[in-house]
Image: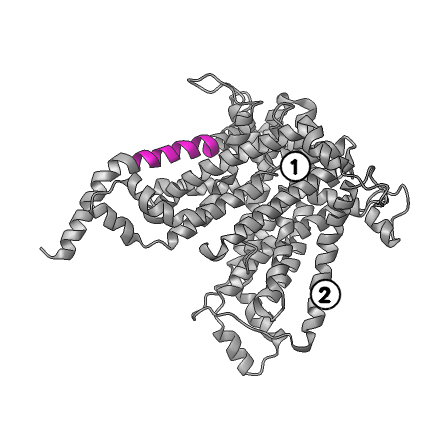
Amino acid sequence: MSMMSEIQRRTVAARRRYWPGSEKAVLWSLTLLIGVLSIAPLARLVWAAVAPQGIPDLSRFSHLLGTRRVLTATLNTLTIAVVSTLLAMLLGTVAALLIALTNLRGKQAWVFTFILPLMIPPQVTALAWVQALSPSSPVLQFFGISLPPGSPSPLYSMNGIIILLGLHNAPLVFLMVRAGLRRLPADLVEAARAGGAQPWRVLFTIILPLVRPAIFAGAALSFVTAAGNFGIQAMLGIPGRVPTLITLVYQQLNTIGASALADMAVLSLLIAAITLAGLMLSRWLGGRQDVRVTGTPRSLHQPLGRWRLLVEIIVWLWMILTLLLPLSALLTTSLTQGFGQALTLSSLTLNNYANALFGYPAIRQAFFTSLGLTLLTAVILTVASLFLAYFLSWQRTRLVRVLQLSTELAYALPGIVTGIAAILFFLKPLPIVHVSLYGTVWIILAAYLSNFMALVLRPTMAGFAQIERSLDEAAQIFGAGFLRRMRDILMPLAAPSAMAGTILVFLTALNEIQVSILLVTSGTQTLGPMIVFLDEGGSSTLAAAVGCLMIGVVLILMLLASLFARRLPEGVLPWRV
């Protein structure tokens, strides 16, 4: 018998020996985890919508969906999602072309600032813009261009929601288009240039058609995010009387309570249907023509020539307008004694920060609750993703593919749908233990684990893609069990990528509002919804201070992740060039 056949025989024997034990136990544990946290709650949501009394009754659908209130909210949701996506496509694509194709200077700094709004909680973004463009805005007063006293903020309108969502989601399109441009073979572009084609002709006839799938993939993410973005829709739409499906669910559940869950389940399915339809439409538009080409991907380069300085001035002025203006208004408000006061030595105060950190027990409790939930979520998801990534990379059975699809679906659906599903599933006491999670921090943890699994899994799988499988096979030949191989070989190699996913969870979950807004109670407050509650209660300066602290935490986490950028796979940290 040859040496190779002997090695193969021992490898097969080792797999047969260890698969029925630890590997199978881990796989079924992951199945139970994802089944309880993602699959079962979504199934419960569907059942509650079609059979609230235990018997299928589709007449409720036509009755509820045919009301004027729901029709108006649906139309507003679609309009906001579509138009803001078009705006995000324009801004994100232009930004990606400038970064990927030109000799623009200071790319790393500009990309960091361009991505930053995506990492800032949307409710903080909305608060900052409202304070920047209100009649009593201290920043506009400083430049002498404030709005007439008593006039409403122009952002309290559908146009305001669309603009802010377009700005907030433009980085999503940017990330997808930049990735597509990096994979673009340069041969066709160089051939067109050699044939005398002008840069604009090359752009519109070669580059943009080839990256069309990436553009529509970014558009799909933008559409889903816009349709399910509670922070901006609530902060601007509720005061501006622009109802959407998201705000309708929130207001009805807060007004009526648990008795409205059946109707809210129907509305949640409608929101889910809109987002999934947007995903499928975008995928169809991006794949109508075959744009596959051969060739080795290489960086394209289009010098700006004498236009470079002007383009650099424009892009940095844009950044000042869209980032520094609202953040400076937020910071100024947080340092004054009352909203609308000019920032002077006499009005300067740190009381808002002192109250945010020490004076209000509710805020302090919300911070520690969010921190504890985020830490627990990050640890559990990191460990689970390391094992799930192993099966997805090297043991892609039908069950494993179903688990991956479930995690992706839970992440794609708006967080408020996840929240309604969690309420419906965990409202009654759990079997065997007879304990109800409703009204406790554990229901928020369960929703976080369901919603953010894919966020850790994607970079972890990128790490496993760089691991040579022969290392695992060699360990199997010499008798190492599954758990030992994971502990001694695979986890250390995949740890940097998994850690990047952990940091992304921190950035998302610590200030999260989409999932938890319906799950928090007076005793289980989290940091994300606190901004909305403070602003609704008239504490604008305190809300501004909390918002600035949240942004500070985001910046620290982003900078911390950047320190490990060289040890991570390319593309794991979205703000790295």
Residue at the far front: name it.
345
Q: Residues within 10 Å of mark 1 (few under 14, many from 20)?
A: many
Quadrant where the C terminus is found in the figure: bottom right
Most extreme residue toward the right is 149
Residue at 25 percent across and 50 percent down: it is 473
Figure disc tally: 2
Circle 1: element type? helix
* Left or right: 432 in relation to 366: left
Q: Which is more toward the observer, 70 or 483? A: 483
Q: Nearer the viewer, mark 1 or mark 2?
A: 2
Question: Which portion, as a residue range, is magenta?
Answer: 24-39
Q: Residues within 10 Å of mark 2 (few under 14, many from 20)?
A: few
Residue on which the image places disc 1: 246
Check disc 2 and report its element: helix, strand or loop. Answer: helix
Residue type (three-letter) at the residue carrying disc 2: Ile
Rendered image: mark on residue 314: 2
Residue 138 seen: yes
Instruction: Please say if 441 is above or below 238.
Output: above
